[in-house]
């Protein structure tokens, strides 16, 4: 028997095998670092998933869906979204977006927010179209734009110096309005907005959103608004939905994730909300790609949203409690990173934190000719030698800019107290080894 992995090399075919649209897209930060996290006995603050249990009402909804009397929940359901789920999503988000949402035409349930993004690019971006990506951005945007034949156009959030002795906040990272405006051309088809932003944790302020919205309207550009961390906003900041700003509903697709909303990333339930004239094209991609998302998971998410609708804004709402809990964990991790000699950038949202590790850099040799950015090599060293997993921030930048921010790495803090404590121990021990008692 052939060992797995040799088939491709040993093929006798003379024609090119790989489709051209996949060129250069084979590397993926999650594939690489999830494998490393599983290979070494390390504390995992890498990929963004909770090691905390989801709330009881969410687990119970799933158990009921698979173990209850409705045996049809084991079968196919409506292709564009299980009726119970699209109905509650339309009710829930209709209020927040200020729109009367039709569950059948304004909501599409997808296999996680990942598939929602894929549908947006495949359905609405053509060969030659430009798509504006705000760096740092969730890494899959760039390959997805390219797979659709589009061209990513980058614009950077730039850090402003924090006041003397103060830690930087994600709010100190801002777009230069003139630079952003200059990225809109005749070829611009869409801009991707991710607020709260992964990996930085920036929550775009209303004025920043209005500026982006005005440019979209002026240049007749679509907006794919990735809002998977919509409930994770701290320090009294407000999550603004760009689709609710004047002139934006008709040109915006809002993307959400049950994985992030209910701490169930393995269920892979996501959704898009938007006008029928946009969603009908996403439906074409969806029906020809995955057909539908698992029925029982959709039913459970529907029940979970119903519960949240009944508790909306109250102290026992999971969305309220999760944000409070995460803000505490954020503050613990800030202290741990400082104790370890890093400079954290305090996130206003999400469960991620970027940190400058420059003071610890000397541990790994600088190899200016290496193709791999320094942060990636540093983390691999840190996993093997210190037993701590993070994610390189260079993964969230376009190819031309990967080196500019490789003094930063990203930590995830949606973790049990014990996990954060173990990370804290590693960081403090490391610091002691460097500086002495
Ligand atoms: N959009 C953003 C901004 C995301 O962060 C994610 C999930 N990312 O989690 C991995 C990590 O950054 O550690 C998605 C979309 C995809 O969401 P889903 O899991 O619902 O497909």
Image (cartoon, grey):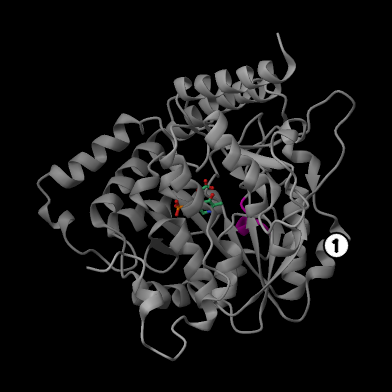
Q: Residue at x 59, y 82 (%)?
A: 126
The spot of residue 151 in percent (x, y) is 67, 75
Mark 1, Cα crowd under 10 Å, few <14 / some 14-19 / many 20+, is few
Q: Residue at x 52, y 69 (%)?
A: 120
Q: Where the N terminus falls, by quadrant?
A: bottom left
Q: Residue at x 66, y 20 (%)?
A: 335
Does residue 12 show up magenta in the picture? no
As drawn, 100 above or below 206: below
The spot of residue 427 in percent (x, y) is 61, 23
Q: Is residue 218 visible?
A: yes
Residue farthest to the bottom, as pictured: 15
Q: Is residue 84 left or right of residue 393?
A: left
Q: Residue 271: which quarter of the image?
A: bottom left
Q: Is residue 154 left or right of residue 93?
A: right
Which of the pair 95/191 is nearer the observer? 191
Q: Which residue is mark 1?
A: 179
Magenta residues, as a range?
241-245
Does residue 242 show up magenta in the picture? yes
Residue farthest to the top, as pictured: 437
The spot of residue 14 in percent (x, y) is 43, 91
Which of the pair 39/97 is nearer the observer? 39
Q: Main secondary structure of the magenta part?
A: helix
As drawn, 364 above or below 119: above
Q: Where the C terminus falls, by quadrant?
A: top right
Q: Is residue 212 left or right of residue 76?
A: right
Q: Residue 169: which quarter of the image?
A: top right
The spot of residue 7 in percent (x, y) is 34, 74
Q: Is residue 412 visible?
A: no
Which of the pair 63/355 is nearer the observer? 355
């Amino acid at each position: 028997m052939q060992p797995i992995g040799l088939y491709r090399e040993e093929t006798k075919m003379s024609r090119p095998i790989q489709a051209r649209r996949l060129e250069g897209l084979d590397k993926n930060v999650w594939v690489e670092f999830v494998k490393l996290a599983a290979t070494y006995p390390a504390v995992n603050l890498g990929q963004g998933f909770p090691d905390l249990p989801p709330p009881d009402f969410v687990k119970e909804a799933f158990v009921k869906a698979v173990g209850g009397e409705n045996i049809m929940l084991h079968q196919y359901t409506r292709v564009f979204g299980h009726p119970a789920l699209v109905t509650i999503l339309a009710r829930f988000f209709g209020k927040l977006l200020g729109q009367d949402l039709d569950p059948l035409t304004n909501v599409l349930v997808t296999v996680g927010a990942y598939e929602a993004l894929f549908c947006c690019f495949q359905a609405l971006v053509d060969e030659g179209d430009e798509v504006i990506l705000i760096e740092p951005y969730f890494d899959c945007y760039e390959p997805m734009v390219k797979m659709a034949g589009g061209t990513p156009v980058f614009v950077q959030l730039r850090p402003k110096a924090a006041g003397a002795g103060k830690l930087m906040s994600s709010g100190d990272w801002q777009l230069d309005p003139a630079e952003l405006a200059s990225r809109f051309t005749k070829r611009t088809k869409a801009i991707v907005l991710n607020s709260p932003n992964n990996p930085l944790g920036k929550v775009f302020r209303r004025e920043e959103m209005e500026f982006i919205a005005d440019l979209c309207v002026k240049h007749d550009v679509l907006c794919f608004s990735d809002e998977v961390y919509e409930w994770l906003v701290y320090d009294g900041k407000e999550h603004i939905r760009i689709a609710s700003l004047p002139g934006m509903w008709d040109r915006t697709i809002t993307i959400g994730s049950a994985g992030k909303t209910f701490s169930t990333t393995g269920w892979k339930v996501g959704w898009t909300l938007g006008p029928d004239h946009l969603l009908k094209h996403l439906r074409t991609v969806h029906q020809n790609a995955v057909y539908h998302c698992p029925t029982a998971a959709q039913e459970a998410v529907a029940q979970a949203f119903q519960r949240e609708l009944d508790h909306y804004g109250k102290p026992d709402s999971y969305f309220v409690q999760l944000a409070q809990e995460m803000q505490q964990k954020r503050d613990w991790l800030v202290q741990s990173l400082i104790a370890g000699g890093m400079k954290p950038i305090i996130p206003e949202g999400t469960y991620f934190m970027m940190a400058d590790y420059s003071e610890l850099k000397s541990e790994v040799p600088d190899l200016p000719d290496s193709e791999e950015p320094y942060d990636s090599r540093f983390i691999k060293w840190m996993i093997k030698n210190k037993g701590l997993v993070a994610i390189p921030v260079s993964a969230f930048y376009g190819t031309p800019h990967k080196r500019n921010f490789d003094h930063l790495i990203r930590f995830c803090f949606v973790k049990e107290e014990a996990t954060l404590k173990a990370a804290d121990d590693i960081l403090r021990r490391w610091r002691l080894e460097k500086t002495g008692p």
